[in-house]
Image (tube, coloured by chain):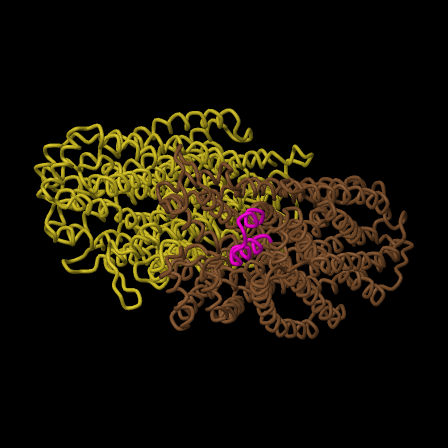
Chain colours: A brown, B yellow
Amino acid sequence: MVNTILVAVPLLGVLALIFMFIKRAGVSKLDPGNELMQRIGKNIYDGAMAFLKAEYKVLAIFVAVVAVILAVTADPGTSSIMIAVAFVLGAICSALAGFIGMDVATKANIRTTQAARTSLGKALGVAFDGGSVMGLGVVGLGLLGLGSLFLLFKGQFAGDILITDATTAEAAQTAMLRVITVITGFSFGASSIALFARVGGGIYTKAADVGADLVGKVEAGIPEDHPLNPATIADNVGDNVGDVAGMGADLFESYVGSIIGTMVIGAAFMVMPAFYETDLNGLNGVLLPLVVAGIGIIASIIGTFFVRVKEGGDPQKALNTGELIAAVIMLIGTFFAVTTLMPDTWSAVNSNGDLTTYTDMGVFYAILLGLVAGLGIGYITEFYTGTGTKPVQGIVDQSLTGAATNLIAGLAVGMRSTAYPILVLCTAIIGSYYFAGLYGIGIAAVGMLANTGIQLAIDAYGPICDNAGGIAEMAGLPKEVRERTDKLDAVGNTTAAIGKGFAIGSAALTALVLFAAFMQTARITSIDVANPFVMAGLFLGAMLPFLFSAFSMEAVGRAANDMIQEVRRQFNEIPELKAALAMMKRAGHDTTKYSPADLAIFNAADGKADYEKCVEISTQASIREMVMPGLIAVLAPVVVGFAPQLFGAEPAMGAQMLGGLLAGVTSAGVMMAIFQSNAGGAWDNAKKMFEEGASVQGTIYHKGSEPHKAAVVGDTVGDPFKDTSGPSLNILLKLMAVVSLVIAPFLV
Amino acid sequence: MVNTILVAVPLLGVLALIFMFIKRAGVSKLDPGNELMQRIGKNIYDGAMAFLKAEYKVLAIFVAVVAVILAVTADPGTSSIMIAVAFVLGAICSALAGFIGMDVATKANIRTTQAARTSLGKALGVAFDGGSVMGLGVVGLGLLGLGSLFLLFKGQFAGDILITDATTAEAAQTAMLRVITVITGFSFGASSIALFARVGGGIYTKAADVGADLVGKVEAGIPEDHPLNPATIADNVGDNVGDVAGMGADLFESYVGSIIGTMVIGAAFMVMPAFYETDLNGLNGVLLPLVVAGIGIIASIIGTFFVRVKEGGDPQKALNTGELIAAVIMLIGTFFAVTTLMPDTWSAVNSNGDLTTYTDMGVFYAILLGLVAGLGIGYITEFYTGTGTKPVQGIVDQSLTGAATNLIAGLAVGMRSTAYPILVLCTAIIGSYYFAGLYGIGIAAVGMLANTGIQLAIDAYGPICDNAGGIAEMAGLPKEVRERTDKLDAVGNTTAAIGKGFAIGSAALTALVLFAAFMQTARITSIDVANPFVMAGLFLGAMLPFLFSAFSMEAVGRAANDMIQEVRRQFNEIPELKAALAMMKRAGHDTTKYSPADLAIFNAADGKADYEKCVEISTQASIREMVMPGLIAVLAPVVVGFAPQLFGAEPAMGAQMLGGLLAGVTSAGVMMAIFQSNAGGAWDNAKKMFEEGASVQGTIYHKGSEPHKAAVVGDTVGDPFKDTSGPSLNILLKLMAVVSLVIAPFLV
């Protein structure tokens, strides 16, 4: 059976890719709308590709340099070259997933707009199919990459593992750990790309947003989604860069990291008689995460077919149905997999040193717990950031006394919102450990992430609808079209909030799994916080999320400034833009809204705004500003891992201090991620509530009122919080854990 | 020699109190100024006393309840009644220190104003003498309380300790640990009062500040320091409540906690032949922290006499001179104490399990490191928050584009400012451990805090000068008086920033010392973060500072709202106030500044503004809002300590998980404290820079300009950050560590 599974796993990855191509072809052949829509769409598409091209150019150099370093220095016990190969493959898969997602998202957007001209159901279908391409691409490439590497390296380093007694079991375990150590490179590759996609993408999107907003809206008096606004394309590209490519790379990293981490932990089962006596090779603990991921792919594919809505129906309900069906299928499949692959009971020493009996049902419960925890954290996020919820209404109320009280309220909501997700996370940690030991924590993370296919489809659906709305506005389509896209977009905001919570929760659990894998690889059994090196590591680790957030926020400030200068320059120096603006004003048009009546004016100035220059500025700034945070994330574990030796301590103390660093960065990083994401989300929706007319103490306040202006300040502060510094921390946690795992063999 | 030291320690506490009374008498007999000044002064004094009375009433109940619980349940191995007695004494000493500080500060303020009418030097002298009363009161009561309890309980539980061999040494150690466990109650008492003083004080001062500012300044158009403003007295009282009583209780807690924690760690030396063979009783490791604190008292007293300035001189230099002289005396004295009390060399097993040789000079270096680290963190704080420094100028620059960019810049500065203090702290932890093991970390904390006498004198000097300036304004004194108080006040801002950094650094180190003492008492030798319970504890711990900050910020919002309603009511309902305001406006007076020309109008309305009601509202709100954060701080360690037993784990696992909780709350708490304090401080000074005319890109912007208004928003957001939620975290860390230490015997 082992060989069947080994071959089936990459094939399930291929299956996901096949469905991805089918969905992609389906989206591509749809009507892209009228000429203006196509022109706008092409500009966004070109901008997105320009960003990816520039980013991948830098990435290629980075990947090549790190690959050479890895090939030369990586664990001498394994084949260094192979780690480098796995690293490059991981980077390529992640980059490819990002490309696929961006490509389809920037095609699906205009087609969603066009579909919205006829029906809500069709528009939902296009947007969700676009999201599905991203989701299936991520899990397909992830499982195909992991599965093939495992198949390849297992043959190379471990051969046919034949375990007959305790001695052969130990030899097989050593060989298997060598195999998985090599595959760690794949995870490291994925993390590196994620860093660029999340941090760089976050800087990109906010620089463009601020530029389009501040100069376009405030100074020139035209809306951000206006063809005369030079930063408008960069802004629309930014939505895709941040929420599609960034989120995709983030979940790709979690998906791959949680599987690999659990494989490392599962290798512990290889030497247990309960495993090797009842199952072929005793490999089942290592294989289970791959199998669960494979089941998740099937569940996700089936789930996507249930996302349907009729005119006047509720898109949210359609998405929920798809997700629920996928979850049920995944659980049923997993139940059979667990009971087939795991022994009924086995005994192992838990970390208190007691011999404990575990059962296969315990493993299933851990998976269930992981799945529920992931959704739970998502829904808590929605409670703290959703339109009209009590916390957001509180921010709306406080906007009455000005920007300062709006800000204090938002900061307090963000800080307070850390409590419940952490309680859920702690319950998942303790519960899954109670059910299935350390392996339980790993498999819970896999369970949380197994349905990434459909989860990410729902996440990516949001920015596609957002773009579709912007295009409807720019193309001057009739009101009912905008109403349909708005309806889809409103649901997109909810799914985005849930997706953000899910991303943080899964990042935390993945970091913990990698942490456990790191300890196993570094051969340390405990990390004692009472040890001063570990305590110092803990403090340093807890400090890094703050420093990292400061860097990314300041980076947004600088990048936005570059963009502001450029947009101002274009308005001043391009005669056609100047003339068009002047004409619109002379004609008495309301320049604060785009109106189809301006089409002639727009056509006269068409092609004159230098969109590419703005895209380039955002791209360059994001790449330039990524260097420092990236270096911190990669170098901090290396420095801390080797520092204690300078104080005369043994190498193992480096592993301990590094463990402290990881504990600090994970705990403080999760809090800062939740705090910043939720504060930003809550401010955003408080502002939106005013735009729809918010009621405070019986009075309705609208757009343009003083409280609305206060809420706009909060939203602007929240922007880098929720789109740059907050989500970047997900990557920081995981990347530092992966780097630690890679250097672990040197700290033994 | 032991008996000499045992008696000398409380006597040095008495010496500090004698000098305190001398300084207090000196301040009291000074000229309190003209009738108006005296009337204003009396209102502030009465308000301060009203606050203390209300607070102490609630505290008395709290202390009585906890004392009864302690008496009934505390460690059955020791005398529970005695722990309760120590607890009550600790609470009384801390409360008494707060009373002394508030009493003298509200007397020194008008006398500083009066002295400023003649000379800068005299005014500095009065303000600093006022601060010295607080400083000497804190260290005097601390050492007297600790020393007497030690003398008393040692006699009761340990008798004359006569160590002759290993067996008698172990028996003596057990007896001694019992003695120190009882004294822990003193620290718990001090922490409880500190919670009320810091959290309650923080809420009080901001509620009053916002009320005076928003309604008085913005709505009625009169300055906050105006006799017609009903909240003005509450506002002035608030400065004292927060910065005098709050800071005093905070440092009192650190002072006492670090000494007791080090005594617990020092008891480990009792069973080492190197100690009991070369010194009487082997008690020296336990006595050294008391001796160092005693030397610090002498050094502080001498140092206070060197704080002098001539007209036109630099008050900062005078304060630095006093501090430097005290530091040098402390180091010289400590050098002799360490070389006398400690053996030349001894060997002990360090936490890596290796036998290491330590020397007496190593202990001295640890003390030196602690002293330098405390000052270092203070000066780093000044760099990030001081007027005209690069980070603050950056916030000023960003104010040009509005409140949002000002806020993002301030948040980034606060987050970034965590890096260097943490590097200093980690260096102190690893360095002092390298020099003298775990005891090194403890004695470093004692070294940092030994000069609390003069350090706190400098801290308390600030709010006295601040008050003095306000009184000069309200009493309409000539311009040169205000110039002198402004000069003193400017220095006060710097010392306040340094003091805040020092308070955080010392809180962190004290929490670590108490943490080590907790482990010793709970008899656990390691806290393994790889254990899921510990990991969950770490996450919960890291979450608490966020939740605690959210609670205190929201509390400020609610309390400020109460105050706003009351001030509005008074302006509407009190005819004399209405009439006076109308008269001032009719007379064409500039109501945005207080002018002596309004004296007649003021006299007509005198006594009509209901100051007491505003003081009462702030007081009631602060007490009401303290309940929730207080319960969290006290109950979280208890719940976490006993929770694992519910999951079938052994009691020791509770101690481990509690260890995780403490590690999490200390690491994340220190970051959040630094982040919030420094962001708030930086925003405050950015605003002040505009008020003095700030230069941005070659243009000077003044008070009332758009960038200044943006900076005011930042300052308002920063107020609860730096004066409520930030400093409250110092208490959270220490209180949770002390509670853990108290319940530790139950978790064995």
Tell me if residue B339 comes above or below residue B666 in the rendering.
below
Q: x and y percent of residue B647 in the render?
A: 67, 35
Identify the image quadrant of residue B605: top left
The C terminus of chain B sits in image quarter: top right
Identify the image quadrant of residue A657: bottom right
Report if residue B601 lies within the magenta region.
no
Report if residue A467 lies within the magenta region.
yes
Q: Is residue A358 left or right of residue A415?
A: right
Residue bounds of the magenta highlight = A465-485
Residue A611 visible, this angle: yes
How many numbered discs? 0
- Foreground residue, A440 or A231? A231
Q: Is residue A305 left or right of residue A48?
A: right
- Foreground residue, B606 or B361? B606
Tell me if residue B339 comes above or below residue B612 in the rendering.
below
Q: Is residue A382 left or right of residue A153?
A: left
Q: x and y percent of residue B117 in the render?
A: 11, 49
